[in-house]
Amino acid sequence: MRFLFKAAITVFLVSLSTFCNAGELRLRYSKYPLSDLLIIIRDQAPLSLSFNQGELSRYKVTVDSTFTDGLSAIRYLVKELPLNVNIVNGVIVISPKVDAYIIGGIISDKESGERLPFANILFDNRVYISDENGYFRLPAKHSEGLRYSFRYLGYRQVDTTLSPGTGRIIFLKSTRLEIKELLFEDYETGKALQIGDVSGVIRINHAIAQYLPGNGDNSVFNLLRLMPGIRATGEPSGLSVWGSRPGESSVVFDGSRLFSMSGFNEQISSINPYMVKEIRLMKGGYGPQYGNQTGGIAEIVGINGNRTKPEFKLNLNNLTANLFGSVPVGKRATVSAAYRQTYYDLYDVNVLNPYGKRGEIQTSGNGNSSNPGNNQESIYITPDYNFRDANLKLSGDLSDNSRYYISLYGASDKFKYSISGEEFSLDAFELNNQISASAGFDKNWKDGSSSGINFKYSALDNNSSKAVRLNKENYYTIDTDNIGTETGVKIRHSFTVLSINNIEAGIGADNFSDVFNDSTSKENKFNFYINDNINLRKLSLHLGLRGDVYNQKLYLQPRFSLKYNLLENLSLGASWGIYNQFFGKVPIIYDKIAPALIWKVLGKENYPVMNSIHSIISFSYSSKEWLISLEGFNKNNKGLTQIIRSGNTTAVENGQSDIAGADLFLKWEKKGSQVFGAFSLAKMTETYDTKLERTRSSNPLEIKLGALLNLNPFFFSASFVYGSGYLNSFGIGRYSNLGGEVYSRFDVSATYSFKIKKSKFRTGLSVLNVFNTSNAKTLDILPSPNKAGQNMFLNLYSESIPFTPTLYLEIDL
């Protein structure tokens, strides 16, 4: 019996030992490749493993131990190596250790493959922004998957889980005609789109412009003119932000400056809306990436084209024609082209004006004669004007992580008028030809950083002539030939430090030149910049420095901005910076005819480099239906220049200006319909140092209202602009008070959108200046003694937009 008991105990202990050792893993290897050893462990354990065999074969390991399971063995083998072990969905993932985990990729349109620039990514209560090519670089707390939200104006939000790595492609789907997300601010906080951006920045989804008053050819500026701080009063030919003078603010398309044309008729903007993908309006306080500007910048990113299929669009109305085409070239590139042409002289637009013509005198156009004062007579003139432009762009990928583009643009406009009477005659002519070219190459690296190189070239050739005769004698004749060119190259690199710092640094070189009649001036400029974007949970900081080496002098320009989120949808912001401009417009003030504007290289002779200091503080609130933005700003400008010509003498005056004011923007939106208002108020002073110091002051005011009613497929909209107090200070003569008149304009439109099979159509009626308000643009002021011998003046003026109905049809194939 005792024998049987001992035998049973022995069998039990042997069985227990065998059972306990069944899960053990015995490893005894010397200088063995880690990748091969992991395969042995995988087969014996068994386990699900993920690792780079080529990467891990470099490591030779020695082991002589017994392990309870495969995971313990793997952790033991890699504990002295720069490797991490994580479990993702039941799979053991072995990856290299990194100081900070990075997720990188590209955000694209799901339908066309078009990259989406400056998209917002929400992660860990912070908002990150993709670059101009749609590339994003995000931190991750660890190697396991984390939740990210991707948002873009006019597109549906995408929420997804991502693990560290580069080469990700995030596709977003456009809301198209839903008109729910189309407007347009980068002022919102929390779940909206503002966090992480700077004060003074408005992002515009120009898709809404096709439903606002206008004929589609001016949709870019039609949106800009409704924004707070953007001057609409007097309908200036160029961009004017916070009272900036001509040339101080600029429009940049695909990296190249677009010079403003004569701009007589504002029914067509200087860039084709079919070529526009993204608009960022930087009113002030922008970062060190941008140089040679003291005013605002409208940065327009052009489309890359549809890579999946050919696209053709046609917009016809009773004033202009616009044609666009995009064709894939292989699987990695597209070619896009567009052409616009006006035909204002096809018929007399006054025939459609129910208010009647302004009146007629002996002139090449139509005119109106009135007597608003005791010593001035006004004559209304309709000049002859035509405009045409063309775009051509090639864009594509050399690989999944590198891309390129070449963008070409050309434009021409012609402006002329003549008038004659018993005692006087005048002939005026202006021709502008503009070309611009830009090219770029960008590369994303495996560590999540990115590099790029960009080239740009812009040129404007302006020829003008004016001949005035009084009492059958030559009173004044002037011919002007002005050519301005800007050429540049920039190299940049951006990378992430830790998990909260995104640093961008760059170097570049520019060349500026001008030709004014027989005089030529050229100058080179070299620059560098660094910008550190720091993202904390509630606080975003942008710390930057720009340096420009110009004419053997270093111009340092520190800049910073911050945004603090008080609540999820309530934030405060501020920005400050120093800005220099080395190439700009200078007015020539004559004693007998209207002033002219020429492009000049600054910093030479009596033309100082312009300097401006921007200070901005902002408040913004957003909810599902409401958006409120309030900004206070101050700009102090030095180095202003104007040329005074009297008879055969020429004098150059230098001055300074100061402007302080506030912008308020309100928007209410529900189910695609919206009402918005913009209010701007400022105080401006301008002082020139002459023998007698001369100071001018003004108080510009603008009120802008708009509404859009979405009854899809029908859309109705209206806009109203009221402005006063804008003065164009030109010396002390008869042109010293131009632009002080009260301005107002009311526009309406109705649009119907529909589809026939796969083709899209949009048609509508738009009426600009419904009440035919007379918004005069002075052309010349001429002396005209009357029969009694009194000194009288003839005020020759035109209007950009009288009562103007447009009926249009757009076809998208």
Image: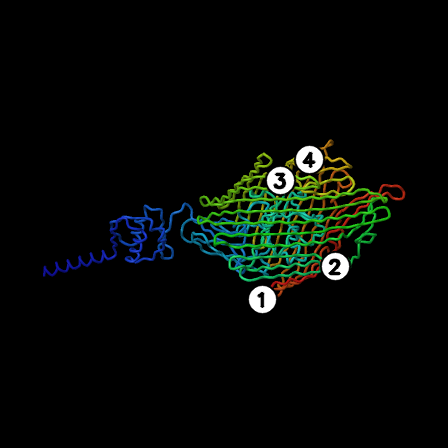
Instruction: Looking at this view, name the residue that lies furthest to the top.
Output: 691
Which numbered marker is on residue 654? 4
Q: Earlier in the sequence, mark 3 or mark 2?
A: 2
> Which of 127 and 435 lies nearest the eye of the viewer?
435
> Which of 414 and 719 lies nearest the eye of the viewer?
414
Q: Which of marks 2 and 4 is nearer the N terminus?
A: 2
Q: In which quarter of the image is the N terminus?
A: bottom left
Q: Which amino acid does label 3 sit on?
A: Gln
Place of residue 255 in the rendered image (x, y in percent of width and height, measured from the top left) = 58, 48
Residue lying at 58% horizontally and 34% vertically, measured from the top left: 553
Q: What residue type is labelled 2?
A: Leu
Q: Left of 151 or right of it: where is 472? A: right
Q: SS of the residue at dot 3?
A: strand
Which numbered marker is on residue 758? 1
Do residues under tags 1 and 2 come within 8 Å of each other at their CB atoms?
A: no
Mark in front: 2 vs 4: 2
Which numbered marker is on residue 346? 2
Q: Gap between marks 4 and 1, in whole Å? A: 60 Å
Q: How crowded is mark 1: few (under 14 residues within 10 Å), some or many (20 or more)?
A: few
Q: How crowded is mark 2: few (under 14 residues within 10 Å), some or many (20 or more)?
A: few
Q: Which of marks 4 and 1 is nearer the N terminus?
A: 4
Q: Residues within 10 Å of mark 4 (few under 14, many from 20)?
A: some
Q: Gap between marks 2 and 4, in whole Å? A: 46 Å
Q: SS of the residue at dot 4?
A: strand
